[in-house]
Amino acid sequence: MLRFRTTLCLLLAASALVAQGAGKKVLFNHTKHEDGGVSAEWVICSASEPNPSPANPVSEADWNGGISGWAFDLYKQGYMVQTLPPSGRITYGDATNTQDLSNYAAYILPECYVYFTAAEKQAIYTYVQNGGGLFVVGNHVGATRVTSSVPGSTDAYTVFNDLVMVNGGNPYGFTFVPGHGPGDALANTTSTVFATGTSPAEQAIVHGANGTLSLMDFHSFSYLSPNTAQNPNVKEILHTGIAADTGSFIVTTTIGAGRVVAVSDSSPSDDGTTTTAGKTLHNSYTINSNRAFFLNATAYLASGSTPTAPTPVVSILSPATNTTITAGGSVSFQGSATIADNSTLSYAWAFGDATSAAVLGPVSHTYGTAGSYTATFTATSNQGKAASATRTITVNPASLTINASAGANGTITPSGAISVASGASQAFTVTPNVGYTIASVTVDGVNQGGISTYTFTNVTAGHTISATFAASAGSSFSETFNTGTKGAYATGTVALATGTWTLNDALLGTSTSDPKNGAQSVRVRNSGKVTMGFNFATGAKTVSIKHAKYGTDGNSTWSLWSSTNGGSTWTQSGTDVTTSSTTLATATFTVNVAGAIRFELRKTDGSANRVNFDDFTISGY
C-alpha cells in the first residue's frame, strides 16, 4: 500500500508539472552571440532553430546545446520551447514577425555578448509591462567570448546593465556589479542564503513545484544590486553568502503586469553536453538546487498574465465641444492621446469631408461647403491598437437666396431673388395699393435645404419691415467603420457608430494590408455586400465612399445601391466603379432622393480579389 501511494503521488506530481506548462511557449534568445568562444554554448540546439530537432526528444542529449537540459525539462512539462535565431527580430506587437514576443509566455536571455538596440530594448520592456516573463542570465568580468571576431562585443553583465536603462531611467530596479572572475580564489562558491519571505515570487521560486531550493553553486560570477528606489518591487531571492561581499546572486521584480528574474552567473544552467566541436562545457545543471531553480523561475515567469497590448486613451482638446461655423470658416483641432506602456503612437484626423491629416495637432481645417461633418481623431499604437474620439462640426451656408412677394394688392421692395448673408437682417419696404390691405407678405430664404419663412399680415399702410435670415446646414451622415468588431467573412451584423450594418462575405480589417483611415475599414471579397440595416431619414443628395485594393490583390469592381422601402427593392446609383489602387480614393455618386433611404455596397466582379471601403458619407437635404 505504501508503494502504491508513493507511486500515485509521483504520478500526480508529474501530471501537475505537465499541466503547469501545457500550451505555453518559451523563447530562448540566440541573436547576441550566445554561443561565442570555447566555453559558451548557451543555446538549446544550434543545429536546428527556431524549433529544436528532433521534435520529440527522448533525452536532453538529443538536442546539442549547452542548455538543452533546461529546455528538455521544459518540453517534458508541456512547454513549447523555441529559439530566436541569429537572423531573428526582437519585436513586440509586430504582426509581420512570427516570433514576436507577444506570442511567448517567457523570454530567456542567456549570457548575451552584444548590445541590444534602442528599439529592441523598448520592445522587451513593453513586452514585460504587458504581462511577459523575462529571464536574464548574467556572467562574470572578462567573460567576453567574441571580442576578436565581433566588434563592439562585451561582457554580458555590461550588456544587461544597458538593457535595463529605458526612457532615461532604470525601471527594472537592479544592475549587475563585478564579482569574482577566473583565477580568483572566491570564483567557485556556494550559497544557501535563500529568501524566507512569503511573497508570490519568493514562494514560487524558492518553494516551487520542481523542488525547494537549498544550495546553489556559482563558478566565476558577477553580483546583482537591487535598488528599491528605482523599483519598489525588486526582491532578493539568493544572497551572496561570501563574507564581506554584498550583493545578490538572484533577484526578481515586477514591471506593470510582467515579471523578471535575473541570475548573476550562467554556470548553474550549463548541462555539459554539446556536439559542437571545440567547446569545453561543465555539468552544473543537475547538481544541488540548480535545476530546480531554473525550472521554478521559468514556471513563475510563464504563469503571469498573457502579454496583451494596451489601447490608447484619446480625447479631443479643441474644439472642446461640438461646434457651428459658417461655410468658409476654419476650426482648430487638437487631439490628446496616452498609452499605458508609453509605446509609440501615430495620429490621424479625418475631418469628415474626405480630407485628413496625420498629426496630433494643432491643425486648422477650413470647411467650404455647408453640411454636418463628423471629425474623427484616432491614435494608433505600434502594436496596432487604436482608439478614436469625434466632434460634430455644423457648417452653415455663408449666404442664402431670398424671394419676397406682396401679392396682387401691393408691392414689396426689394423683391425677386436677392442674396443675404447668413444671420443678417434684410429690410423690406411694403406699400399697399390705394384702398387695399395687404393680407400677407411672405419672404422665403432657401439654401442647402434649410428654409426660413417670414409672414407679415394685414399691412394697411406703407412701412418698412425687417427679418433676420439664419441659414441651416443640410443634414449629413458619416460612417468611419472604426468601431465594432467582425473578424470573419461569414455573414453577420455588426453595431457601428451609425447603427447596425450587415456584412456578407465581408469583415472589419485591421491589418497593415487593409487600406484605412483610423483603426479599421471594411474588407469585401467574392460577391460580398455591405448593407445599412436602417434608414437615413432626410434623403441623400450625394454619397461618397473611399475605396482601395487589399494588399497585393488585383482590381475589383463594385457598385452602390439604394432602397426607399426598407430594403425590399434596390436601385443602382450611378455606374460600377473599378478599384485599381492600394491607396484610398474617393468615389462620389449623385443620388438626389428625398425621404428615408438606405444604401448597400455590392462587389460585382465575383473574384477572390479583396476591396476595402472606408468613410461612407451621405450629404442629405
Image (cartoon, rainbow, N blue to C red):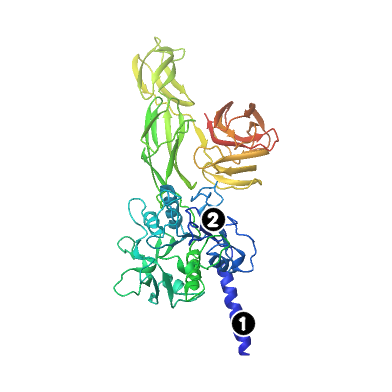
Q: Looking at numbered disc 1 in the image, what kind of residue is underneath it?
A: Leu
> Callout 2: 10 Å neighbours few (<14), some, many (20+)?
some
> Farthest residue toward the right?
606
Residue at 63 percent of width and 47 percent of height: 488
Q: Pick whichever, 293 or 595, lies toward us.
A: 293
Q: Pick whichever, 262 or 403, lies toward us.
A: 262
The image position of residue 366, as x and y in percent, is 40, 27
Residue at 39 percent of width and 63 percent of height: 140
Q: Are marks 1 and 2 in contact (CB under 8 Å)?
A: no
> Farthest residue toward the top?
434
Circle 1 SS class: helix
Q: Is residue 403 left or right of residue 161?
A: right
Q: Is residue 571 above or below residue 95?
A: above
The image position of residue 301, as x and y in percent, is 47, 64
Q: Quadrant of the N terminus?
A: bottom right
Q: Is residue 291 left or right of residue 568?
A: left
The residue wearing badge 2 is 103
Q: Looking at numbered disc 2 in the image, what kind of residue is underneath it?
A: Asn
Q: Is residue 185 left or right of residue 475?
A: left
The residue wearing badge 1 is 8
